[in-house]
Structures are given as structure tokens and as C-alpha cells.
Image (spheres, rainbow, N blue to C red):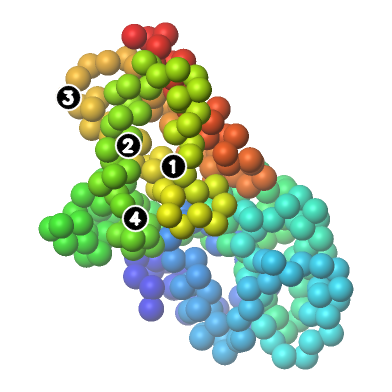
């Protein structure tokens, strides 16, 4: 059973098939345990579980309505296009009597208001540093500075974090001296599609925030305040779907460069 989400587990245990919400949205950071919570729901009510995020064509939705077997349907809603969101409106509003729909989201920002309003919202609790410390040892304790969920820690352990830290420091210290062309080449280090040998951008942004904070503790520099605010904006935008991630990151690099040059 998932740890650290006692309130949600209590809600599940106190529910019956009749009282459990037919359309539910679980909102929480990446790696917070949304899929594990779905497993708990599936086991509690003995429901087959199916992720239908990549198959939301009207024909498939119609097929679902004709099924007799009860299911727990999962949709990773922050990955949907506006067209897909519109296609599931009726499905959410008029779910099957013997089945349930759970939408998984990192944020409700950018989602159609009609979708959010038609779901019961359960927000996952934030994990404390004390709780997360059980997932690291002495060699990986530094991960607590950039990870706020168990899943993020597990993913970071598979990433070349030391190299990412070096790159973050290099960007913070030298981007004001780089040309526009050289600044934009930094995006070549990151995976914007399925590129396993490149850095995970969301994890790198968390590392950037930690390194900026760390440098601010050791030196008073107003440029670091600007860098922090610009990086926070990028992190928030990365959680919103339908953005061109590469263009978003390149704009961030240019904004960061401009702020560091102006305030030099």
C-alpha cells in the first residue's frame, strides 16, 4: 500500500461501490503515487484497470459503453490535446454505471474548466523531507535537494545527476557571457522526444532551482533572484500541456541570459 497519502487511502477505504466518485481527478506532482492509488482503488473494488489515454477515438468510447464488465479507466489528462479533452466530456459527465474514470494530472492549469468541474478532485499530500529520506542513502542524500516525491527520487537515481549539476552551474555562472547562438545550443543536451541518452528537462529545472538557491546562500547577487523567478516560471509552464517544450526552453534560456546580462 502506498505510504504518505493517508487521507486519500482513508477515503478509498471508507467508500463503497455506490459512494465512490464515478469521475475522479487525482492531482499531484510527478512520482507522487497517482498510479499506485489507482491500484489501491482497483484492488478495493476488484475492478479491471485500463489506461485509455492513447485511445480516445469516438468509436472506442462507444465500445466502452457497450461493455458489461466493470472497469477502472485511467486517463493521463495533462497529455491530452484539446480535441481529446472535448471527446471525453460526455464520457466524464455520463460515466457507466458499473465503471469508474480516474483522471491523472500534475496540475489543473490548462485543462478545460468543464472537465475539472465534472470531476471530484483529490489532491495528493506533499511529502516531507523526513519521509523522503527513507528512499536515499549517504551516497544519494543530495537528491533530497531537488526531488519532492518518491518517484522523482527513483528517476533521479537513473539520471547522470552530477553531470546535470555541473551543467546547471555552468549556465548560471556563464550564460551572461555566451552569445545568443551558443546559448540556444544548450537545448541540444535535453530530451524533447524519446531520447534516452539526453537529460530529462523537468528534473534539470529542479536542479537549476536548487543550485540557484545554493549560490544565493553564499553570495548576494540580484541576478540570482531574477534567475530563480524565471526558472520557477519555466517549471510551472512545463506542467501545462500543449506547449512546445523545446521552444519553451529556448525562450527560457534567452530570458535567463538577458536578465543576467542586464543585472550584471
Q: Is residue 122 left or right of residue 75?
A: left
Question: Disc 1 designates what residue?
Answer: 189
Task: Name which quarter of the figure residue 31 lies in.
Answer: bottom left
Q: Which mark is residue 159?
A: 4
Of the numbered discs 4 and 1, the one sitting upstream in the chain is 4
Of the numbered discs 3 and 1, the one sitting upstream in the chain is 1
**Place of residue 107 in the rendered image (x, y in percent of width and height, measured from the top left):** 56, 49
Which quadrant of the rendered structure holds the C terminus? Answer: top left
Of the numbered discs 2 and 1, the one sitting upstream in the chain is 2
Q: Residues within 10 Å of mark 1 (few under 14, many from 20)?
A: some
Question: Disc 2 designates what residue?
Answer: 167
Real-space CA distance between mark 4 and mark 1, rounded to the nearest whole angstrom = 13 Å
Identify the residue at image location x=51%, y=86%. Answer: 43
Question: Disc 3 designates what residue?
Answer: 218
Of the numbered discs 2 and 3, the one sitting upstream in the chain is 2
Is 28 in front, or is 8?
28
Residues at marks 2 and 1 touching, judged by CB atoms closer than 8 Å: yes
Of the numbered discs 3 and 4, the one sitting upstream in the chain is 4
**Place of residue 91 in the rendered image (x, y in percent of width and height, measured from the top left):** 79, 68
Task: Name which quarter of the figure residue 84 lies in.
Answer: bottom right
Is 180 in front, or is 64?
180
Identify the residue at image location x=58%, y=41%. Answer: 245
Amino acid at each position: 500500500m502506498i505510504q504518505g497519502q493517508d487521507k486519500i487511502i482513508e477515503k478509498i477505504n471508507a467508500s463503497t461501490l455506490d459512494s465512490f466518485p464515478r469521475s475522479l481527478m487525482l492531482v499531484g506532482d510527478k512520482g507522487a503515487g497517482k498510479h499506485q492509488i489507482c491500484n489501491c482503488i482497483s484492488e478495493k473494488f476488484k475492478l479491471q484497470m485500463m489506461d485509455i489515454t492513447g485511445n480516445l477515438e469516438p468509436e472506442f468510447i462507444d465500445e466502452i459503453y457497450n461493455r458489461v464488465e466493470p472497469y477502472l479507466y485511467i486517463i493521463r489528462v495533462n497529455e491530452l490535446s484539446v480535441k481529446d479533452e472535448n471527446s471525453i466530456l460526455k464520457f466524464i459527465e455520463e460515466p457507466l454505471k458499473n465503471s469508474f474514470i480516474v483522471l491523472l494530472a500534475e496540475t489543473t492549469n490548462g485543462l478545460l474548466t468543464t472537465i475539472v468541474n465534472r470531476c471530484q478532485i483529490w489532491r495528493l499530500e506533499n511529502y516531507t523531507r523526513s519521509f523522503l529520506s527513507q528512499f536515499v542513502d549517504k551516497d544519494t542524500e543530495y537528491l533530497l535537494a531537488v526531488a519532492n516525491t518518491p518517484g522523482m527520487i527513483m528517476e533521479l537515481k537513473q539520471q547522470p545527476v552530477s553531470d546535470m549539476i555541473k551543467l546547471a552551474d555552468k549556465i548560471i555562472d556563464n550564460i551572461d557571457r555566451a552569445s545568443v547562438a551558443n546559448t540556444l545550443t544548450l537545448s541540444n543536451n535535453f530530451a524533447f522526444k524519446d531520447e534516452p541518452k539526453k537529460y530529462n528537462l523537468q528534473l534539470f529545472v529542479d536542479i537549476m532551482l536548487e543550485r540557484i538557491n545554493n549560490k544565493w546562500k553564499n553570495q548576494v547577487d540580484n541576478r540570482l533572484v531574477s534567475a530563480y523567478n524565471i526558472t520557477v516560471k519555466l517549471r510551472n509552464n512545463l506542467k501545462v500541456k500543449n506547449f512546445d517544450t523545446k521552444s519553451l526552453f529556448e525562450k527560457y534560456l534567452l530570458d535567463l541570459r538577458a536578465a543576467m546580462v542586464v543585472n550584471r
